[in-house]
Amino acid sequence: MLKLTYCLTRRSDLTREAFQTYWRETHAPLVHAAAAALGIRRYVQSHTADTPLDAPVRESRGLDPADYDGVAELWYDSIDALVAATQTEEGARHGAILAEDEANFIDFSKSRLFFGAENVVVGAAIDEHN
């Protein structure tokens, strides 16, 4: 199982609320529609929330204030499956739709993404055979 983690920063012209609303209500349905074509097995949005714990936890670890407005996590069967999906006409079309839409709410210069494999320590992993 391959996991893409995308740490998102909103465009400067959007409030966090507007960013999260757009991401949840406009972009999420596009990802859902693209899932089969792109081989997306799971898609999770984690929206940044302000809590009373933010400052104490950051200060206890010497961390800078949060730069991200959310994290998107996408799971694929494998890198080969993802590459193959993006090379089909339908996969390429959906990939272009998603990238074009991301420009409506994401500041690419301040966002980061990486691929990785999960090492589940607590809780259940995705069943890799479903």
Image (spheres, rainbow, N blue to C red):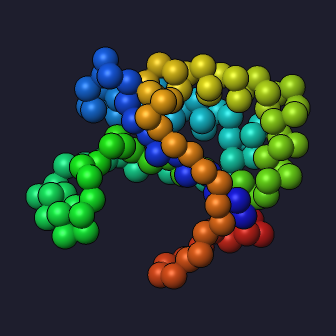
Residue at 59% in and 75% down: 119
Residue 24, percent from left and from top: 42, 35
Residue 46, percent from left and from top: 40, 50
107, above or below 50, in the image = above
State left or right for residue 125 relative to residue 88.
Answer: left
Q: How many labels does the image show?
A: 0
Q: Residue 84 occupies which quadrant of the picture?
A: top right
Residue 25, percent from left and from top: 42, 30
Residue at 27% in and 59% down: 63
6, above or below 1, in the image = above
Q: Can residue 75 be seen in this view?
A: no
112, above or below 98, in the image = below
Residue at 38% in and 24% down: 11
Quarter of the image with the N terminus in it? bottom right
Q: Is residue 38 visible?
A: yes
State left or right for residue 75 relative to residue 86.
Answer: left
Residue at 64% in and 61% down: 116
State left or right for residue 68 relative to residue 114.
Answer: left
State left or right for residue 37 relative to residue 42.
Answer: right
Quarter of the image with the C terminus in it? bottom right
Work out whether residue 21 or residue 102 is closer to the camera in this orientation and state it.
Answer: 102
Residue 39, percent from left and from top: 75, 46
Q: Residue 106 occupies which quadrant of the picture?
A: top left
In the image, farthest residue toward the front = 62
